[in-house]
Image (spheres, rainbow, N blue to C red):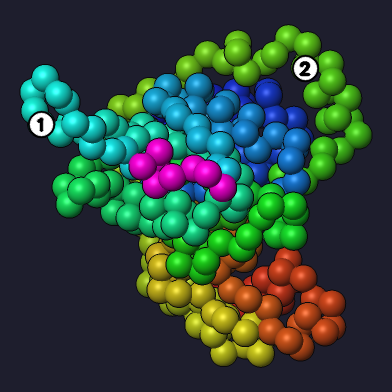
Amino acid sequence: MPELKTIEVEKTVNSVIKGKEDVVKKVLAAILAGGHILMEDIPGVGKTTLATTFARSMSLDYKRVQFTPDVLPSDILGFSMYNSQTKEFEYRKGAVFCNLFLADEINRTSPKTQSALLEVMEEGTATVDGVTRELPSPFTVIATENPYGSSGTQMLPESQLDRFMICVTMGYPAHEDAVAILKGNASEPVKHIQPCMNVEELTELRGMTKEVFVKDDIYEYIVNLVEETRRNPMFSMGASPRGTIALLKMAKAMAVLEARDYVTAEDVQQVSRATLGHRVKLGQKARAEGVNMDRAIRALLETVKSPRS
């Protein structure tokens, strides 16, 4: 059964990424929901390894671009080159023509190059020289970024942040997990990953995710949560309608991972931080009181009445 494949993928990724089961589950849910993932953390905590492991375990065509200030939009989208033999311009595909595109350290490149991903992430197409081309399906972007303020970084614009379905943080490993990483590092575990899902099975799972049943009171609950971010003084900027849709899609994907065909309020709550945290901004009062985003989202969930499961 296709849904059992998700368990195998989780086990495979967790065998390489130690102690980050919650992050792995949310990334897998975003892939099932057809969304894109932003991973913000300091270098060296396993962000790239996580993306590579997912690509190998799901048999996805995978490409990686290390974003630096000199990376051009043509490196991402492709370009037209003149062929002197045919006397015509020929299109050469860019790196985004794959199933899983890893944009490594996306906030180190120029805004012009970052904006090249806007159409790619929203429409699943790439336009070069006035010609629009479809990207392979399924298509997912996993982008990593160093924390704002790190050397050579700049903040991503809100328009781009909003196109990421979730934003997650790896964090440092616990002591026991750090020891396990050291013990397994010598064998280079990523190279030994065996595929446990193919593209056809992933496509089927995405279709199942879309068909998950949602009661009216869950729809109301999701909208109430997002509307509260717009009127609560704790936030200076609320989530967009795209954030509402992302919250619904992530909740559906979590239901699939829990082997259910219906969404519960707990599914919504479980993905609220990852889905809304990068879409809202803390207000001046919250910052003055030392409230971080985790506490703000928890307070949001406590403020909005939850429907009965």
Which residue in the protein does label 1 denote? 88
Eyeballing the image, is 278 above or below 190? below
Q: Earlier in the sequence, mark 2 or mark 1?
A: 1
Residue 165 visible here? no
Q: Which residue in the rendered view is the most extreme toward the right?
A: 175
The stretch of residues the image draws in magenta is 69-76
Q: Does residue 71 belong to the magenta stretch?
A: yes
In front: 92, or 221? Answer: 92
Q: Please give left or right for residue 229 compared with residue 233 in the image.
A: left
In front: 292, or 209? Answer: 292
Eyeballing the image, is 268 above or below 170? below
Res 208 quadrant in image: top left
At 75% across and 46% down in the image, what residue appears?
42
At 52% across and 44% down in the image, what residue appears?
70
Classify mark 1: helix, strand or loop.
strand
Q: Amino acid at mark 1?
A: Glu
Of the numbered discs in the image, which one, if any, rests on residue 191? none
Give percent across and percent down for residue 286.
76, 83
Q: Amino acid at mark 2?
A: Asn
In front: 73, or 82? Answer: 82
Give percent across and percent down for residue 135.
27, 39
Classify mark 2: helix, strand or loop.
helix
At 69% across and 52% down in the image, what residue appears?
152
Which marked residue is nearer to the observer: mark 2 or mark 1? 1
Res 153 quadrant in image: bottom right
Q: Please give left or right for residue 217 compared with residue 135 in the image.
A: right
Q: Does residue 105 belong to the magenta stretch?
A: no
Q: Residues within 10 Å of mark 1 (few under 14, many from 20)?
A: few
Of the numbered discs in the image, which one, if any, rests on residue 185? 2
